[in-house]
Image (cartoon, rainbow, N blue to C red):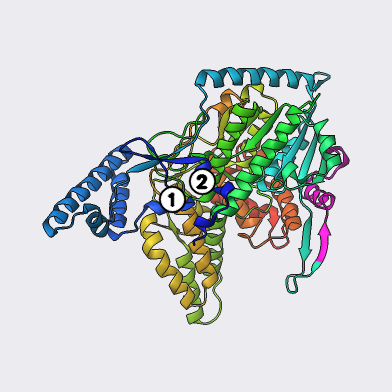
Amino acid sequence: MSKEKSLPPELEPSHYIEKVSLVTGEVLDDEIQPKNLLVGNHRDYHLADVQARRFMSRLLKATGDEELVREKMKDLRERGHRASEMIAKAIGQRDPSKVSKALFGLKRKEYYFRYRKPPVSHDEIDALLAEMREEAAERLAAATVDGRPALRVLLTGGTGFVGQEIMWQAAHDDDIAEMVVLIRPKVIRDRKTGEVKETLTPADRGEALLRRLWLDTPELADKFRFVAGDVEQPHMGLADDELERLRASLTHLIHCAASVAFDDPYEKSFRANVTGTLNALAFSHSLQSAEDSPFIAHLGIETSYIHGRQVKIVAREEEVVFPRNFYNNYYELTKAMASIETERFIVEKRLRVVELCPAIVIGESRAGNNRGDAKVVNAPVNVFGRAHQALSKPKGTFVDRSSAAMIAKMACVFPGDPSAEMNLIPVDRVVAGIVAALKKPGAMGRRIHLGTDNRLKSQDITEIVREEIGVDVKLADPTLHRNVTLPVLTKLLAGVKQERLGNALEKLGSIFGSYTEWGQPVHEVGRDVEILGLSPERPNTRYAFRMLCRHNRYVQDFGQVRDLDEISRREKIWWDFCMDLEGLTGGPVGAVSAEEFQRAIAESLDLEGFVHK
């Protein structure tokens, strides 16, 4: 029996999703396996299908008309089905679908998936949300001291990239009186023997975290308290005495803990994203239900990609529907399931919740600081950067240098359609929205995208990488790369004993191949300004990505500087340098050209020891 079929009952996708016949409209009593809900499961990887996608990509590049391309793709598929019917009739094959699948990689779906939703009318929900907003406003007023809110917030996921920025902004927000950070003890083991060397308590980890965030002065550090817990455990894994203390004092819970690995298996993603969310929601409900509780609201940090592959309509903030083009990975799928659970808590348990959905989060907008994060968009930039280092510093014999050059050029192939758009958003904008939501009763019961309206195309990304790193990244058709180029490339790299690089490229291809195809979802934005009161001028994504490249190059040495204390030290120097440059130029550092920026670096920083000159 496969692993997919042996899922524990509580992890079954059918708790959230049902399969519906396109012919009769009836719900089908078929087993739903997690893999059935991903894009990859509905592609045959047939040679004809690959060529069709390449043709459509070129047509899009020539016309710029996505609607035309979709209609042409639809027409081409219908022609393939009709041809298959004629061929099947000619050869005596009773089932034309077998012919269409064998010859053209085509198959007709006679079903679709949809989310199970509570049977509540829009009028009932509107009335419920109006009550919630009124209750939240009253409780926010009750938490006000001397004309200012005195908020006490429990944060999960504080050690993560977004969580650390939440701590930074909370430290400098006078409306937040206390932030309690849920954190697990950390066991340090010897790498060779596996023996336990030491165990860091939450207080130990918290002290180190505050130091790295430059928050270790008494006036800032006193705002924080670190407690032992685990979001995957009931009651958040908190001790009984801590539970009582929090029930009597907390005004908010920010649930930021999650698995952000796009390539994790379903069960691991489910336990991190759904089980963790359920435990956090149940905890917030217990706070809200406690007698004389000051609790105001639960803030769930999700992702705008809960909408999956919506390629025909804008992904709207107010609703989640199962995407007809499925999900790219289990991260998206399980975050969508978590959102469905959140909706259920709102409707059935009257829990006051705000759902905040960031797009793809990158480093801080002005300097690119990311506190050591090396995942998601940072990963390919670091691979390209290390390839450039290998090309610019050749060593050894002619054969060795030639081999290094070949390997480096192999690493600089990236699956991406030039027109594909990525919704990148700097972490400071995301967290400004999260902190604002703590004080906005009108956000109650809302789903709010924290994304941008100035998205970057794959072609823009390669241009910036070339200017900032000196690497000429070649875009490869995602479908062809995934099915043909990448398997050949990994075998070649294995042949020259570069399995590690091959594995890295394979991982990058599997993660980004879906996000860099044409027809990416467009996420509706607006509530970040209308409801949360953020600036209508969202960060310039081009500038922010340019600063990401610069930060990864100079501060992290393309991921090779890994010591978090050292990264913190460098980022402080980097921040001061960027702010000085901003003062000199009178504008954003991201607007400074690559040549001017490199001259400024040479004049101001000693990169050998990473210190001011």
Residue position marked by numbered label 2 in the rendering: 13
Q: Amino acid at mark 1?
A: Asn
Tell me whether the residue at label 2 lies in contact with that at label 1, contact meaning CB atoms closer than 8 angstroms: yes
Foreground: 407 or 71?
71
Was residue 275 drawn as part of the magenta stretch in this picture? no
Asked whether residue 90 appears in the rendered view, the answer is yes
x then y, percent, for residue 180 = 79, 39
Q: Amino acid at mark 2?
A: Pro
Mark closest to the chain's N terminus, 2 or 1:
2
For the point 73% across and 40% down, the residue is: 155
For the point 58% across and 17% down, the residue is: 127
Secondary structure at numbered mark 2? helix
Q: Where are the magenta residues, as a range?
A: 197-224
Residue position marked by numbered label 1 in the rendering: 36
Foreground: 49 or 247?
247
x then y, percent, for residue 545 = 55, 46
- Taking the image as shown, residue 193 lies to the left or right of residue 42, namely right
Query: Label 2 vs label 1: CA separation?
Result: 10 Å
Secondary structure at numbered mark 1? helix
The image quarter containing residue 558 is bottom right
Q: Quadrant of the C terminus?
A: bottom right
Q: Count the marks: how many?
A: 2
Residue at the outermost right position: 218
x then y, percent, for residue 553 = 60, 57
Residue at the outermost front position: 29
Foreground: 328 or 231?
231
Residue 342 in the image: above or below residue 493: above
Foreground: 267 or 153?
267
For the point 74% across and 22% down, the residue is: 140
The image quarter containing residue 537 is top right
